[in-house]
Image: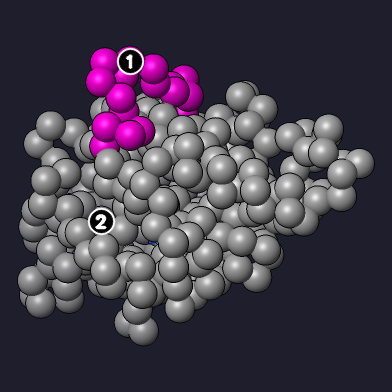
Amino acid sequence: MKILRTVTELRNWSRALRLETEPETQLDTRLETRGAGAKIGLVPTMGALHAGHASLIRAAAARCNAVAVSIFVNPTQFGPSEDFASYPRTFQADCTLAEAQGATVIFAPAVEELYPAGASTFVEVEALSTRLDGLSRPGHLRGVATVVAKLFIAAEADLAFFGQKDAAQVAVLRRMVIDLRLGTEIVVCPIVREADGLALSSRNIYLTSEERVRALTLSRVIHHAEGLVAGGQRRSQVVVEAAREMLAAEPSLRVDYIELVNWASLEPAEFVGSGTLFAIAAWVGNTRLIDNTVFE
Ligand code: AMP
């Protein structure tokens, strides 16, 4: 499988594919319609790929003629005391997994390729990027929006695939695509979980076996909240309080946030309705985990 290292290579790959398969008459409008010829899919990741990423690549391969998987540990979305340096990097295994799931190319740029010396342009989705993870990880969602904007501009993809697991990120990126008229459609895929409920995450490898057991509280809380709402409970305060009690019963967990919000605005929701996001973040030892569910 081809490994592309520069923005120019990625752009040329995407444009060549489109020219190959698109009738000439449609070329003039190609940037606006994008869907007319070969459908190009993009799956942005930071590597250390697992079954959650695999599900995104499969979804992309099912809907697109060609799929680029980006592997880039993005420095601007890490805080100064976070795990940028120690974030797991498993490039060879990632390439094997991506290819097996239907990726056409890997885009793996160096940091200087996406952030040239003196880089000072950032994408800030106001209000949204200071909610949920953006509140406890200042600058995180700005870093995510910035790198995804760069990837979208370089790849000129029709569709880009993201996991519901990072629900605040999805809200920010949806807003960014609308505001910047980026022309890439965001497709959100369900959270992939271990058999016992733990949401897959590249950071799960940081957990000791004892912490791994404690981490299950997060998915239990999500499941409990789903049960309350299925049983007719609509008051957010009641759902959040129940979640808080369950998390408090596991003293080794430190809650970052428990929130019911409108998934589009990330503003608190007083009542649970269609499109309400129930999201939690908690520290298990030194590892911060997130989980969520969206009510229909
Ligand atoms: P990351 O490599 O952690 O930046 O994640 C890359 C993409 O994979 C993001 O869109 C994540 O939401 C998605 N992802 C991570 N974990 C899961 C999961 N357990 N299920 C589905 N998608 C996931």
Q: Check the image and report above or below for 43 versus 101.
A: above
Q: Quadrant of the N terminus?
A: bottom left
Residue in the picture at 71% in, 49% down:
18
Identify the disc placed on residue 289.
Answer: 2
Q: Quadrant of the C terminus?
A: bottom right
Q: Amino acid at mark 1?
A: Ser
Quadrant field for ligand 1: bottom left
Residue 162 locus on image (x, y percent): 50, 54
Q: Is residue 81 left or right of residue 180?
A: left
Give left or right: position of 158 versus 286.
right
Asked whether residue 269 appears in the rendered view, the answer is no
Of 205 and 287, the residue lying toward us:
205
Question: In the orientation shown, which residue stands out farthest toward the right?
Answer: 25
Q: Is residue 121 magenta?
A: yes
Of callouts 2 and 1, the N-terminal one? 1
Residue pictured at 13% horizontal, 67% vertical: 207
Which one is closest to the eye, mark 2 or mark 1? 1
Q: Which residues are magenta?
A: 111-128
Residue 11 at x, y percent in the picture:
55, 41
